[in-house]
Amino acid sequence: MTHSTKSQGYKALGIASLLLLASSPLHASSWPDKPITLVVPWGAGGGTDATARMISTLLEESLGVPVPVVNRTGGSGVIGHSAIANATPDGYTIGIATLEIGGMHYQGLTDITYQDYSPIGLYNADPVAIFVSSRSGYDSIDDLLKAIRSSGHREFKASGSAQGGVNHIAEAGMLLASDIPADKVAWVPSEGAAPGLQDLAAGGVDFAAASMPEARALMDAGLIKPLVILNTERSSNAPDLPTFEEATGNEWSFGSWRGLVGPADVDEEIIDTLQEHMSAIVNDPTYLEFMNNRGYATLWLEGDEFMDFMQSSDQRIGETLKSLGIVE
């Protein structure tokens, strides 16, 4: 072998070694060494954006690199969720997935599902509550359901989200669990919970579905009141409010949720590192004070538990959308 041939062989071997090193788990140990983009599928100023910015701040302190938040809005959440799923799986693009990922593919808005992500952890889940005007004569969820049963078709009106949105699904599921057809109540679409709750306070609808944090301002003003929370346990923010099962004997729980994810196939060592840092963040006093002051429920489910949670959420959304006739 000539000197030139040997030299070429050594170069080839060196390149191959570098490629092997770059693709090996050891390469992940150098992560992170540059900024990590945190994608939010919803607009600035909303609840998901607010929680993302708190997590961004604490991740920056913990990981030692910038974690800028990028709002990728549009398409009812499709654009942002797609940006996360389609990112390079190198750990430098992560994002906040929300409950809406379970409804998009059923409605033909995207092919992306929860299976297109690497689950890092679920950090927030806010159950939906049912609200009526403080001037109404309804003192319990049984009072409201009895009135709906005796009413004419679509005589009662409710609001709290877009058609097929989280609060609409929650309301429809409650009716079905009470043996009331989901379409007996006319749903008045709104651009988020706030306009629907304002419509309730003004007398435009008979009841509304929304989370406790979303309704806090109108509750504090004495304009609306909750009758029941659609959860398996009472809320720490409203310990006197009964669960739907406690009040009626029927099972139905539903609410919005937020979780940290990456695109599919992110290196397991990177996911483990993010989970380690996030498990500390969700117990950080600064984070807990922020969440509690805004009425957001806190929890932490990581890895397979989070994936199972998303699967269950997806299935329930599909079943309820079909009962509403929104999808076949």
Image (cartoon, grey):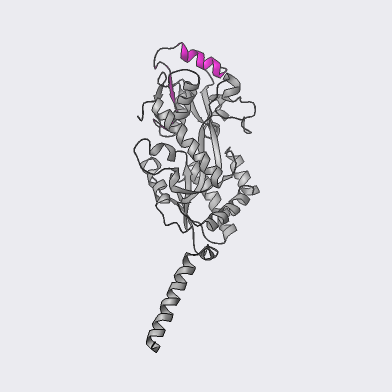
Residue at figure coordinates x 61%, y 47% from the top left: 282
Establish if 234 lies above or below 148: below
Magenta stretch holds residue 199: no
Q: Is residue 304 visible?
A: yes
Where is residue 242? Give x, y as percent. 61, 24
Instruction: Name the quadrant of the C terminus.
Output: top left
Magenta stretch holds residue 160: yes
Establish if 275 lies above or below 65: above
Q: Nearer the viewer, residue 191 or 321?
A: 321
Where is residue 131? Give x, y as percent. 52, 24
Where is residue 3? Give x, y as percent. 40, 89
Q: Residue furthest front?
A: 1
Instruction: From the viewer's perspective, tell me whether residue 324 is left or right of residue 46.
Output: left
Residue at figure coordinates x 40%, y 34% from the top left: 191
Residue at figure coordinates x 53%, y 57% from the top left: 270
Residue at figure coordinates x 38%, y 46% from the top left: 79
Q: Quadrant of residue 124?
A: top right
Magenta range: 137-165
Instruction: Name the quadrant of the N terminus.
Output: bottom left
Q: Nearer the viewer, residue 71 or 306?
A: 306
